[in-house]
Amino acid sequence: MSILIFCILRVIGILSSMSGKKFMDLSQLSGLTPLMQQYFDIRVQFNDALLLFQVGDFYELFFDDAQKASSFLGIALTKRGTFQNEPIPLCGFPVHVLDHYVTKLVKGGFKVALCQQLEQAVTGKMVTRGVTQVFTPGTLTSETLLDSKTSSYLFSFFPTKDSWGLLFSELLTSQIHATVLPVGGDRSLETELFRFLPDEVLLQAESGMGKFEDFFKQRGFFTTRHKLAIDQEQLDAVTAWSQQQFSGASCVELEKNPSLVSALALWHSYLVKNQKDAAQQFKEIHFYRPDEFLLLDPATQKNLDLVANNVDGSKKNSLLSCIDKSVTPMGSRMIRRWLLRPLVDRDAIVQRQDVVAFFIQHPALLHQLIILFEQFGDLQRIVGRIALQKSGIKDYVQLGTITGLIPKLYELLKNCPAVIVQHLLSTCIDFSALHDLLTAACYDGELQDMVIKQGFDAHLDSLREYVTQGDRKILELEAAEQKRTGINSLKIRQNSAHGYYIEITKAHADAVPAEYIRQQTLVGRERYTIPFLQQIQAQAQQAAFSIESYEKEVFQQVKDKVAACITPLRQLAEAICVTDALLGFARIAYDQGYVRPEFNATRDIIIQQGKHPVIGAQLVHQFIANDTFLTDEQSLWIVTGPNMGGKSTYLRQTALICILAQIGSFVPAAHASLPILDRVFTRIGAGDNLAEGKSTFLIEMEETAQICLQATKHSLVILDEVGRGTSTFDGLALAQAVVEYIYEVVQARCLFATHYHELTYLQDHYKGIVTYYADSKKTEQGILFLHKIVKGVARQSFGLEVAKLAQLPAPLLLRAHDLLKQFEHKDQGNTQLNFLPVQKKLPQDNQWEQKYHALSQTHNQQAGLIDTLKHIDCDNLSPKQAFDLLWQLQQESKKI
């Protein structure tokens, strides 16, 4: 008895908070209704998901599931019955709105188990129920649940004492990408995560995995702990399955990496539980090494706004949104994958460039392909859903249309010599039989309950004709009864509860024949039936059941024939989405005037008239283009200049042009000769991480450290304002040390933007370090940013001018101007600073503004005179030039 009491108390504790805890076996508890007994039996098997329990026309959630769902979805929380003398919390929604609420729950970070009634309800018998589908972020297939332009990956991670196994799978394309990392490679693991950006991270539910779960969660990833004992028996089982499923080469590669075998075992077990038939669709594993792609760490992806902007995390104003001109959703997903995994194989890059160049050279063909590809839709996911048996008639209708387009696609591209297009043509096999089958069989009209077209199957047509005859009999019976009874308003109607019935208003109750059998009384009318109507009802029900059953058989035969073509259809879809992605590259290159970059054997980064792809597209002709010449003679640029002068834009555009080149795209420049980079690093901007107790400066130093440790002489390094997060002298010392280390030790190509003008003197000590600055011009109205990068050193940073543009209070600006003059005098040996009380109120007139403007003009004029004196070439100055210069300086000084 004491054990039972303990179990009851434990249940109450679980019901109050189920997160991360497992249900005990509740099937033995007494006092449960049959429905609750069935609920608990099923619930214990899916203790990490919200259980949607079908009860008639509703999906219901109980206990803590109900509390969570009602709060998140904003639906009413009610009660039904009691459990252990406590009310059972309940919420629910109708069956027909399932997609709407499941979409919300999954996007909100919940896993959802769908428990459906597996048979028709019969009075006096408990309906059999079972979980038919589990919705988890990494195993979704529905169009409503997936972003059409983003791939959805399930990531299985398994660490062993010797290595870490990484396995990324995409359900609808049945692709697996696998690699191995050394133990302790946190930064490498982070890089691989951000290459794929998985929707779900799968971990073993064993002790010792908590630190990895924290690692993934801190970086914003959804994690799942799956219980599976990885013992020798389990490994042998997954090895045997792999040998049946994958090629011999893949199996040999797996044998070399035990951590990958364990990751595969974990993945297989999880998939069998949640998507039972999905594992059988995976036929190959793509093994890769991390260095086969250009390394772009998370900070670089974020700083460069590659696939999402740095403001709100959306695609707006990202590089992806700018260059994605593909026609189909699958083409968009391919471009996104390429952006996160740029190539380092020159030949593979050139193959993509060849296709882009061919399309640009044939604009009429380009236009025809755009029109054609618009009809292909999302062939990849259509085929994926069909393969997983998650498709509806709509998918088969679309597939029938698409297979009919293949001959035209072949005709348009048959003269293209590019290797990638030739591969596409090789996948354009004869799908005419499949096209004929689908267009003849699949109903594409608006009737919701019809799947097979009229005329496809003679027996099905005869059954439907029988139903049509039954409808005619009803109309004939209605007319006959109206005539026999003299009640012209008599109607024969139908509903799902009572079938056919005769409806008569109460005003004609006296005229109702005695043989009419009353079925139901309503306000103002009565419903009846007669034996002949019941006979028609029985025949109609039998015919409808026969049609439904036989139509399923016919449709299954069609499905079986399509299933036999899944592999060639997958190959076709993959080739089309690659071609569509390159079509998108050609469109933007044609529209924006991009050029084909060359790849040199040196490490020179030579860009003439380069533009930032996103900002350049927005400003069009107003954008100021700039050159870049990172060579052995000037391998590290120190870039100075005013705030808002365009330094950060220039730094970013250089990195973006290099990345675009290595995904096979043309680039926004007049000319580009580039090396094949192995890594691109950026350290731009500031931000803290309070959750991990990291300050802005600590994060800055961590990112800088990774650059110094991981960059090579084949890398591009972009650094902006290193050292600004600490004191002036500490920051200056660190900044100079970083510059020297990158130049002498790492030897990477580097753009280093800074406001530490002291660093510009490094060009006098290192022959490969040069100085450039963002040019600007002082006018009477204030500073004019020219956004042009020119050789030399900026005179000043114009911080006060930018502060004025931001409309800081005039007294504050005046005080800052006064302090600036004092600081400048202090640098010249004057150690006394004038501390004055702050003016709290601004006078009514504009004397503060006038005074600030006057002082600002004076200061700028003085700075201009000093700058002129600094640049006088006394050794080559003629007497006449000296006289003219002296006269000019005198005139300028009179204005001060």
Image (cartoon, grey):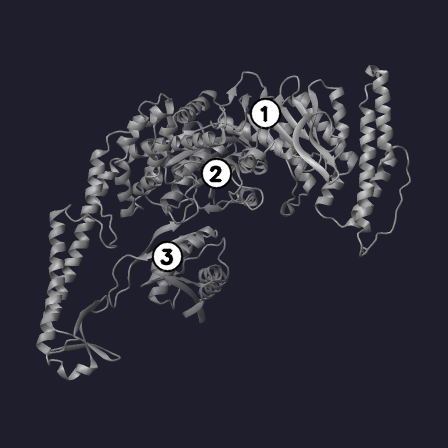
What quarter of the picture does the N terminus occupy? bottom left
Residue 196: x and y in percent read 48, 37
**Relative to residue 613, is residue 129 depicted above or below?**
below
- Answer with the quarter of the image where residue 115 lies: bottom left
Where is residue 158? Give x, y as percent.
Answer: 48, 37
Amino acid type at circle 1 is: Ser
| Mark whose residue sits in front, 2 or 3 | 3
Residue at label 2? Answer: 157
| 155 w.r.t. 75: above or below | above
Q: Which residue is rendered at x = 48% and y = 54% of the image?
A: 21
Q: Is residue 737 above or below residue 65?
A: above
Confirm or deny contact between disc 2 and disc 3 (CB under 8 A): no
Q: Is residue 745 left or right of residue 360?
A: right
- Whether residue 27 appears in this view of the structure is no
Locate residue 816, reporting x and y percent: 81, 44
Residue 602 relative to residue 753: left or right: left
Q: Between disc 3 and disc 1, whose residue precedes? A: 3
Query: Mark 2 or mark 3, which has the lower sequence index?
Result: 3
User: Circle 3 sits on which residue?
Assistant: 98
| Residue neighbourhood size for the residue with mark 1, other residues' Cα within 10 Å, grouped as few (<14), some (14–19), many (≥20) | many
Q: Residues within 10 Å of mark 3 (few under 14, many from 20)?
A: some
